[in-house]
């Protein structure tokens, strides 16, 4: 009988710890956003939950940012190498699209974690 009581206390503590961890680690606020910077200055924040097309002007040219289905992608640009267009969609926290010729960086903030544990050796 005493063993069952300790088991129930342990289960309750584990459930409490799990709930506390979920509350601390869950995404907050508006959810995932695409943060656009041009030449180091923030030019805009766009929620990935709202489909839209954003024209990004820079001194070097333009990039067309398309947000659809919870992901962001540069779908058109007038830079020479089009690396930004070939990057594809980003949706996970910390992912970026970079257009060096235009000095444009698009980064996802507040999205899902990518599941990669960089601390493991």
Image (cartoon, rainbow, N blue to C red):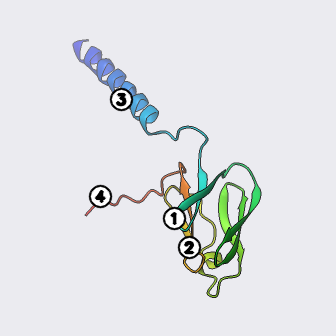
Q: What residue is drawn where x is 63% and y is 55%?
A: 44
Left or right of residue 22, residue 33 in this image: right
Mark earlier in primary sequence (3, 1): 3
Q: Secondary structure at mark 4?
A: loop
Do labels 4 and 2 touch, CB within 8 Å? no
Label 1 close to label 2 by CB (< 8 Å): yes
Q: Where is mark 3, residue-wise? A: 17
Q: 120 or 88, which lies in front?
A: 88
Q: Secondary structure at mark 1?
A: loop
For residue 32, above or below residue 101: above
Q: Which residue is mark 1?
A: 40
Q: Earlier in the sequence, mark 1 or mark 4?
A: 1
Q: Residue, x 51% and y 64% (percent of image)? A: 40
Alpha-carbon span between mark 4 and mark 3: 22 Å
State the quadrant of the N terminus. top left
Circle 2 is placed at which residue position? Answer: 103
Residue position marked by numbered label 4 in the rendering: 119
């Amino acid at each position: 009988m005493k063993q069952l009581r300790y088991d129930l206390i342990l289960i309750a503590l584990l459930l409490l710890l799990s709930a506390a961890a979920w509350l601390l680690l869950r995404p907050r606020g508006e959810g995932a956003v695409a943060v656009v910077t041009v030449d180091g200055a923030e030019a805009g924040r766009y929620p990935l939950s709202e489909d839209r097309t954003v024209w990004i002007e820079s001194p070097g040219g333009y990039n067309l940012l398309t947000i659809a289905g919870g992901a962001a992608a540069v779908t058109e640009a007038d830079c020479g190498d089009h690396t930004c267009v070939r990057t594809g969609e980003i949706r996970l926290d910390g992912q970026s699209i970079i257009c060096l010729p235009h000095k444009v960086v698009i980064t996802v903030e507040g999205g899902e974690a990518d599941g990669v544990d960089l601390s493991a050796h």
